[in-house]
Image (cartoon, rainbow, N blue to C red):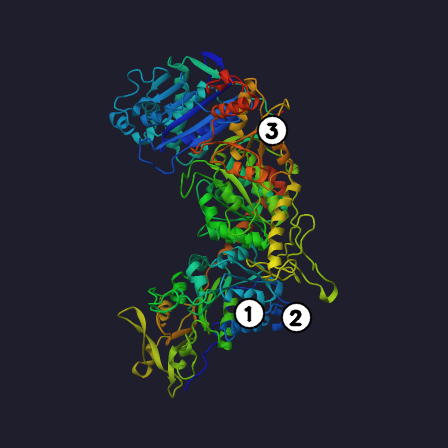
Amino acid sequence: MTQTDKQVKQLDRVIIRFAGDSGDGMQLTGDRFTQETAAFGNDLVTLPNFPAEIRAPQGTLPGVSSFQVHFADHDILTAGDAPDVLVAMNPAALRANLGDLHKGATIIVDTHDFTARNLTKAGYTTSPLDGDTLAEYAVHPVDLTGMTVEAVKEFGLSRKDASRAKNMFALGLLSWMYGRPTDPTTAFLTKRFAKVPDIRDANLAAFKAGWNFGETTETFAVQYEIKPATLPPGTYRNITGNLALAYGLVAGGVQAGLPLFLGTYPITPASDILHELSKHKSFGVTTFQAEDEIAGVGAAIGASYAGHLGVTSTSGPGVALKSEAIGLAVMTELPLVVVDVQRGGPSTGLPTKTEQADLLQAMFGRNGEAPVPIVAPQSPGDCFAAAVEATRIAVTYRTPVLLLSDGYLANGSEPWRVPAVDELPVIDPAFATEKNHGSGDDAEFWPYLRDEKTLARPWAIPGTAGLEHRIGGLEKGDGHGNISYDPANHDFMVRTRQAKVDRIADSIPPVEVDDPSGEAKVLVLGWGSTYGPIGAGVRRVRKAGYQVAQAHLRHLNPFPSNLGEVLKGYDKVLVPEMNLGQLSLLLRAKYLVDAVGYNHVRGLPLKATELAHAIGELVGQAEGIDIDLGVWGEPTQKEHI
Amino acid sequence: MTAPIQTGTSTDLPLPGLRSGTEQVPAADGPQTGKDFTSDQEVRWCPGCGDYAVLKAVQSFLPDLGLRRENIVFVSGIGCSSRFPYYLDTYGMHSIHGRAPSIATGIATAREDLSVWVVTGDGDALSIGGNHLIHALRRNVNMTILLFNNRIYGLTKGQYSPTSETGKVTKSTPMGSLDHPFNPVSLALGAEASFVARTIDSDRKHLTHVLAAAAAHRGTSLVEIYQNCPIFNDGAFDAIKSPDTKADAIIPLVHGEPITFGARLEDGRGSKALVRDTASGGVTVVATNDVDAADILVHDAHNEDPSTAFAISRLTAADYLDQSPIGIFRQVQRPTYDDQAREQVSAAVEQASNDGTADRSARLAGLIGGGDTWTII
């Protein structure tokens, strides 16, 4: 495709949101734009947002599906608070997303679906395209569907099939506007529809027509350029959290020299981990789609007992069902990775939306004193390293580990620097091979005789002669592991299981604090996917001239050993979370620190601008000054942040 | 006149040319004894409990199985019978209520070289764990499930179980239970289990015979064992155990044999026989002398169609157990889940090996660095 003669304007970052009916292919459109953007070399963060219904009623507000992509010529941390560009494929998509736009934003509307019927479905009495409802925006009403149908008429498709290519027309148009490379999408469409040449050709034609429309029409006078970002050297790929997490589990199995066994039951938003792992049998991966959540974790525990790396993947409701079995893994001290891709709760809650409200379930959601280590990734790409770390802890310490991802990480994506395999930790399963107690004819195998350093018990797998032993959910006698109802033994074993988990802190790095001046009085402490919004909020506050420190927790149980000291070093600690203050509760309980919560449970990531104000307010209190963030408090701020 | 339950010989699977349930499990180096399989733990069931008899039978049977002790795993759930693994000197796990089949599925799928056994009870397998049981049976995972059926909850002290007769008066049902009971054999056949048998705790010979056939079967073997609870449900199986009544109560199933029971006629046949009921499609009991010998149902455990086995299972008395078919109801071969799961993995590994290398570490970089990438220098 040829380059344009139109005016080219430089931007340092842009936020685009594609929105349409859930059948309009908006997720695909967004994903393709993202792949083009990744190939171009911008930094990017994406935020898919879609209804739980597979096909919600057409043209209605609940049926709107959107995909937001934020890309820039510098490193960015979030998918952005307020879109600069909204592509709305119908009235409902416009109405559902208008409130998120800043004044002056660009809106590209497919006018084809602005019929009386669709307007009514979206709750409009008159068309917003008439009158001055949208006067504060740069609106481009375009008959995307009509032009698509015209562009593909030579392929003889039904009108319905022809109009379905409208998302590719929109993609072509946006690709032109932002100078995206088109080869990746051309190659993708060619491959995807290889078996249906008419559809393939129609999509390619629509995509090209969209580009050409942008180039020739006077509706769009400006083309934008966002230069590639300067990221640390390395090989990059764009990756979603679920994909990175699945790769991390494969890598964990390889690094531990263990076959991986995933026992699981499909659940949104975790199912893609099952789908992905089921493709990698060549890595010794067995995937077992069980009859329910409990059987999934049960089979994983069985596989671990037999010497595999047992993994189960689920979301919050599934963790609730697995709780008793996780307790069994605590008692039998077997390696197990439990992946919880958190979603809005309680109960069925918001299956496709994100939340961080399973922290306390992960921490305490079992009967008895049943400590479980908790690891949380902070970005989509970081799901890889977090999964490897969860594997390391599970195998080394013979314990179930909860890996807390969330819906935003799972479906969101970012450029990820692919690590070299030799950078990954080597994990030693150290299977028991010999009797470990007594000597000569009296030598025995004691399954609960612990490693002095880690307090881990020996992992003796069936098939190992002479180490036959029985484990189970009943309390074990210290050392020999036979059933014991002795009061003192139970007290000792409860404390020992806790001590083993506490001791993991010896093997994890101290929490690092980002406090450039060393003079900040306020620390912002987060965990999980709030890393991006917190980082972006902190940047805004610093740009406005104030001091603030930031730290982020990878390990939620045990905490890094220096965390108490770090917290003492600041006058105020702000803990932003997508829950009602679960980490705050743990910090207060353990460190007696007056953690201040910043809490939203809207099913969406926290907004950086709002966070900046919350941080600013606390900085003002701590330093006894008035805070004015100026332009840095505005979501439209377009400078480097 | 009564006779011991026949055991027959033709049910000693594997059938010629078929894979044994233990063919990939290493054989013991030398002869073993029951003592080799007895752990140092004190057995703590109530005096007179039927579990003792089953434990003894299993301990004396395992040496005959001839497998290495370290390659045998017993998994149990929760209940009186689920203490079983502690008393056997093999690998074992006493897990959580109802979940033993799922844990055993993980073990059996992970390792082809293990002989995997599940010990469970009527509450464990049919109430809290009913879902796992039927799914293990339909998948046909290579394991043997010993279902101890005492028709009562013992460990929780005497509530009715899912196999208790309707109207049973217990602590939780002072006016009689309202539940219609499960027939474990009918349930297993409905789930298309490939091996279904029923035996009795006190009949060591028949029990051992069934255990041997179950272990030899490749796939999920379900063995229901009638087991007396002397504390909370004593006498539940008196009719099939008493020398005076058992001939009329037990319908012995032997593959290839006409099914007759009751007092012996002069020709050695039982006085009662099973014939097809063409009106209902089921099976019914008639006086042997009233029908042609050719009309008497010949037991075919290897019939791919489970309908007749199911019809026979329906002859089990639902209330007081004064009539019950005993023996191997069904014994057919179909692919096992675990064999096929392992075959998929090994085929993928082989493909990767042909395409380059089977070394996972060497291929990991290719996996994570695949897709559309770009390099920043």
Q: Nearer the viewer, residue B211 or B166?
A: B166
Mark found first going from the N terminus, 1 or 2: 2
Q: What is the spatial separation of the Cα atoms under label 2 and label 3, in whole angstroms?
A: 71 Å
Asked if the residues shown at circle 2 and circle 3 are in contact, with their CB atoms under 8 angstroms apart, the answer is no
| Outermost residue toward the right in this view | A440
Q: Which mark is residue A315?
A: none
Q: Which mark is residue A570?
A: 3
- Under circle 1, the secondary element is loop
Q: Residues within 10 Å of mark 2 (few under 14, many from 20)?
A: few
Q: Nearer the viewer, residue A46 or B163?
A: B163
Question: What's the amino acid at mark 3?
Answer: Tyr
> Who's the residue at 37% across and 38% down the image?
A54
Q: Residues within 10 Å of mark 1 (few under 14, many from 20)?
A: few
> Who's the residue at 42% across and 84% down the image?
B2
* Observer able to see residue B20: no
- Under circle 3, the secondary element is loop
> Who's the residue at 50% across and 47% down the image?
A365
Is residue A104 positioned above or below B14 on the image? Answer: above
Q: How many marks?
A: 3
> Marks 1 and 2: which is nearer the front?
1
Coordinates of residue B130 in the picture (x, y in percent): 42, 59
The residue tagged 2 is B30
Question: What's the amino acid at mark 2?
Answer: Gly
Question: What's the amino acid at mark 1?
Answer: Arg
Residues marked 1 and 3, same chain = no
